[in-house]
Image (cartoon, helix red, strand yellow):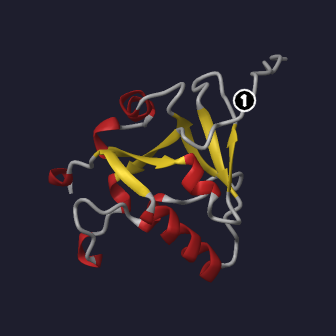
């Protein structure tokens, strides 16, 4: 049996940023996304425990992109932690892993579709590309 290592959880200050990988498959050109726009689909809670991100104190956009299954199919966005916390239902939690000590989660995304879409749209509005997607791969 493998012992689980306990990693120290820290408080993420409002002035810090989170990075998030965005896969090219989330972009749908016919839906009218402009190249510099972060898609609303970038904010999915794939595992049900929160939106996976990486804290900029312990990671970089390039490091995070390298952790993707196929890095060339990913871009990286950044979001200010304080701006996330201004969205009343959302919170940010440091959730380190052995592979990524900066791993963090955006939690509080509702399950009901209309509310979820509204919050995902707000997250989109406060996000910016750090490493844009390579649209030539579409």
Residue visible at 61% across and 25% down in the picture: 101
Circle 1 is placed at which residue position? 10
Residue at the far front: name it: 15
Left or right of 126 in this view: 109: right
Left or right of 10 in this view: 118: left
Judged from the image, the secondary structure of the residue bearing numbered disc 1 is loop
Residue 58, position in %: x, y? 54, 24
Residue at the far left: name it: 136
Quadrant (top left, top right, bottom left, bottom right) of the N terminus: top right
Q: Is residue 114 above or below residue 1?
A: below
Classify residue 115 by image quadrant: bottom right
Residue visible at 55% across and 43% down in the picture: 53
Residue visible at 34% across and 36% down in the picture: 71
Left or right of 70 in this view: 40: right
Residue 97, position in %: x, y? 66, 27
Residue 62, position in %: x, y? 36, 30
Classify residue 76 by image quadrant: top left
Residue visible at 43% across and 36% down in the picture: 68
Q: Is residue 51 above or below residue 3?
A: below
Closer to the camera in the image, 87 or 73: 87
């Amino acid at each position: 049996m493998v012992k689980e290592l306990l990693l120290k959880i820290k408080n993420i200050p409002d002035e810090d940023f989170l990075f998030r990988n965005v896969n090219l498959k989330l972009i749908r050109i016919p839906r009218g996304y402009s190249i510099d726009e972060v898609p609303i689909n970038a904010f999915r809670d794939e595992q049900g425990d929160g939106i996976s991100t990486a804290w900029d104190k312990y990671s970089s956009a390039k490091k995070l992109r390298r952790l993707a299954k196929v890095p060339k199919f990913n871009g990286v966005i950044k979001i200010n932690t304080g701006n996330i916390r201004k969205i009343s239902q959302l919170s940010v939690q440091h959730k380190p892993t052995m592979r990524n000590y900066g791993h963090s989660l955006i939690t509080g995304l509702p399950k009901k579709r209309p509310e979820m879409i509204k919050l995902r749209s707000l997250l989109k509005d406060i996000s910016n590309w750090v490493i844009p997607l390579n649209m030539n791969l579409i």
